[in-house]
Every structure is written in structure tokens, then in C-alpha cells.
Image (cartoon, rainbow, N blue to C red):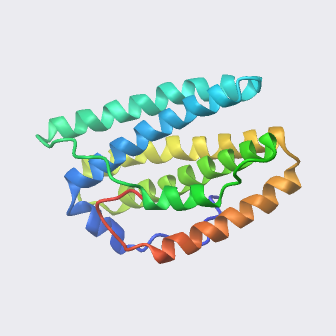
């Protein structure tokens, strides 16, 4: 379904389980950044009616996810740590078009969002199936479902504003880049990506 070219190393779940405070902190910031990114897209592409209508509730949902993760940290007597530099996302952003055609920049933005949501969905699935803590398995299952819907929405929006063959071609390019990025990054259990 997600079409990712490289599955997450299964050892990641065990590493994440050993770093609950860190993985929850990173997860919280990922949700916050997702909400902020949707706000930025709405501001930059306010003339795209469907985009505005579809992303406005996602802003609320992602911010709600941020608050859920904060509540989970608090319930476990854990603290929200510092935000870290997200090498995975930054490398994806480096591949995006800079300047030039506004519509092609939108396409890249939507595809990067879709890719981040797809990878998050895959990681939440792994956590929902692999963690020893039954509560956490259900906790992450809910996030997995939400991320899958967001992934589909960003792909659908890309196809709304660009021809499907162009979307597919660029999507394949991003999938290949994402695979290379993952191969270059150290496997860490304190990070969602």
C-alpha cells in the first residue's frame, strides 16, 4: 500500500522500546511539525480551494496528536525533551525543487508530506505490532491509521493539481531518494524517522 522501497530495520522497534521518553518526545515534535507544515501550505496556496478545505482539519488533527503524545509523556512521568534536527526530513527537503514553477513546488511539497506520512505509518505499524506493552501497541495503532489517511490525502491532492503521470514519475524519484536517505542514516530508537 505505501510503496516504500526499503522497509524499516525490524531492530528499530526494540531500540525504540528502550528509549520511550526519547521516542515520545520525537513523536510529539513530528506531530507539531506536521501541523505547522499544513498551516504553511494553506498560507502559501490559499488559492487552492480543495487543499485549504482538506488541510484545515488535518492541522487540528495533527495538533491533537501532539497533545495526545504530551499527555502520554505526562501520564508516564516523563518530560518533553528538546527538539532535535530531523536529518531524514531535511534530506528530503533538499531534494525538493527550489524556485521556478509554483505548481511544481506544490507537487514536491505534497509528495514530501505524503512520504513522511507513509514512513510514519510504517513505523507506527511496527510499534503497534512489535512492542511488548499492549497499551502502546493500541496507542500506536491509532496513529498508524491516521497516518495512512494523511498519506492518501497528500497523494490525492498532488493528483488534483498535476497530471497523474507526472505525479507518479516524481513520486518514484522521491521513493528512490528516500531509500537512499534511510540507508545513509544510523538506525536509532530515539527517532521516528
Whether 97 is drawn above or below 57: the answer is below
Question: Residue at the spot x=70%, y=23% of the render?
Answer: 46
Describe residue 149's horizontal placement relative to residue 20 as left or right: right
Residue 88: x and y in percent read: 48, 61
Report the quarter where the C terminus lies.
bottom left
> Within the image, what quadrant is residue 71 found in?
top left
Residue 131: x and y in percent read: 29, 60
Q: Is residue 6 visible to the viewer in this orientation of the structure?
A: no
Describe residue 48's horizontal placement relative to residue 165 as left or right: left
Question: Residue at the spot x=39%, y=73% of the render?
Answer: 10
> Within the image, what quadrant is residue 115 found in?
bottom right
Residue 178: x and y in percent read: 58, 66
Whether 154 is drawn above or below 174: the answer is above
Question: Residue at the spot x=63%, y=33% of the render?
Answer: 41
Report the quarter where the N terminus lies.
bottom right
Residue 45: x and y in percent read: 71, 29
Whether 100 is drawn above or below 39: the answer is below
> Within the image, what quadrant is residue 69 found in?
top left
Q: Is residue 26 visible to the viewer in this orientation of the structure?
A: yes
Q: Residue extending furthest front?
A: 99
Amino acid at each position: 500500500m505505501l510503496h516504500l522501497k526499503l522497509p524499516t530495520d525490524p531492530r528499530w522497534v526494540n531500540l525504540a522500546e528502550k528509549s520511550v521518553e526519547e521516542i515520545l518526545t520525537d513523536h510529539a515534535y513530528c506531530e507539531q511539525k506536521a501541523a505547522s507544515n499544513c498551516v504553511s501550505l494553506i498560507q502559501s496556496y490559499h488559492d487552492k480551494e480543495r487543499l485549504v478545505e482538506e488541510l484545515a482539519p488535518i492541522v487540528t488533527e495533527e495538533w491533537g496528536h501532539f497533545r495526545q503524545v504530551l499527555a502520554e509523556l505526562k501520564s508516564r512521568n516523563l518530560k518533553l525533551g528538546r527538539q532535535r534536527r530531523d536529518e531524514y526530513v531535511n534530506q528530503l527537503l533538499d531534494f525538493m525543487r527550489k524556485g521556478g514553477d509554483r505548481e511544481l513546488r506544490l507537487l514536491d511539497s505534497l509528495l514530501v508530506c505524503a512520504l513522511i506520512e507513509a514512513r510514519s505509518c510504517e513505523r507506527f505499524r511496527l510499534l503497534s505490532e512489535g512492542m511488548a506493552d499492549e497499551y502502546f501497541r493500541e496507542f500506536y495503532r491509532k496513529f498508524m491509521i491516521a497516518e495512512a489517511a494523511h498519506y492518501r490525502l497528500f497523494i490525492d491532492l498532488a493528483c488534483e493539481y498535476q497530471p497523474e503521470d507526472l505525479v507518479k514519475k516524481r513520486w518514484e524519484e522521491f521513493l528512490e531518494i528516500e531509500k537512499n536517505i534511510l540507508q545513509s542514516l544510523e538506525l536509532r530508537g530515539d527517532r521516528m524517522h
